[in-house]
């Protein structure tokens, strides 16, 4: 039996609003996933380190501060070659989507996204990873 998806939920930067990240973390846990939450003010380096140490499948960043592009860039650089998916949630202008995808963000979940959409995306992504040749 395969292990449940492991997800790291992180609040990078100086943004101090973590209610949404905590609610998403609980929804993922309730859906049967293993969830690690970094807490507030995580640095990109600490997020990458935690993702590797915890052997997660998905790294979810929650950013409400507007600093999502540089934060995602730094995390994506650190995750490159690990096979871990990087997703972003929060306040993300549509005009930034192409740049974020080019950086390596695989999915963007804006405020108000239905939890089932997030759960479904993670399950599909981790199922693809599990069946991909090593």
Image (cartoon, rainbow, N blue to C red):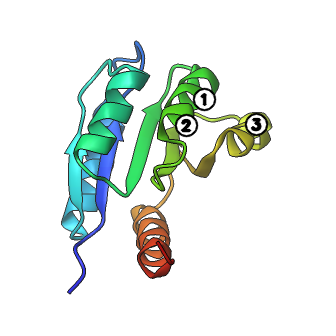
For the residue pair 112 and 66, the one nearer the viewer reads as 66
Q: Which of the two marks, 1 or 3, is nearer to us in this view?
A: 1
Q: Which residue is mark 2?
A: 76
Give the quarter of the image for residue 3.
bottom left
**Going 54% across and 42% down the picture, which residue do you hit?**
80
Q: Which residue is mark 1?
A: 73
Q: Report if residue 111 is visible in the image.
A: no
Q: CA distance from mark 3 to mark 2?
A: 12 Å
Q: Secondary structure at mark 1?
A: helix
Q: Quadrant of the N terminus?
A: bottom left
Where is residue 34 shown, x and y percent of the image?
Answer: 20, 59
- Up-down: is 74 above or below 98? above
Q: Are marks 2 and 1 in contact (CB under 8 Å)?
A: yes
Where is residue 32 shown, x and y percent of the image?
Answer: 21, 70
Residue 56 located left or right of residue 88 = left
Q: Earlier in the sequence, mark 1 or mark 3?
A: 1
Q: Which residue is mark 3?
A: 99
């Amino acid at each position: 039996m395969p292990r449940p998806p492991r997800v790291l939920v992180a609040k990078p930067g100086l943004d101090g609003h973590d209610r949404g990240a905590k609610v998403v973390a609980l929804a993922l846990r309730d859906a049967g996933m293993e969830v690690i939450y970094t807490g507030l003010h995580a640095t990109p380096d600490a997020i990458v380190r935690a993702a590797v140490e915890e052997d997660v499948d998905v790294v979810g960043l929650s950013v409400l501060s507007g600093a999502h592009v540089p934060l995602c860039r730094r995390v994506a650089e650190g995750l490159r070659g690990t096979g871990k998916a990087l997703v972003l949630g929060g306040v993300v202008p549509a005009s930034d989507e192409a740049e974020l995808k080019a950086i390596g963000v695989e999915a963007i979940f804006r405020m108000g996204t239905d939890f089932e959409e997030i759960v479904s995306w993670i399950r599909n992504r981790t199922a693809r990873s599990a069946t991909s040749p090593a």
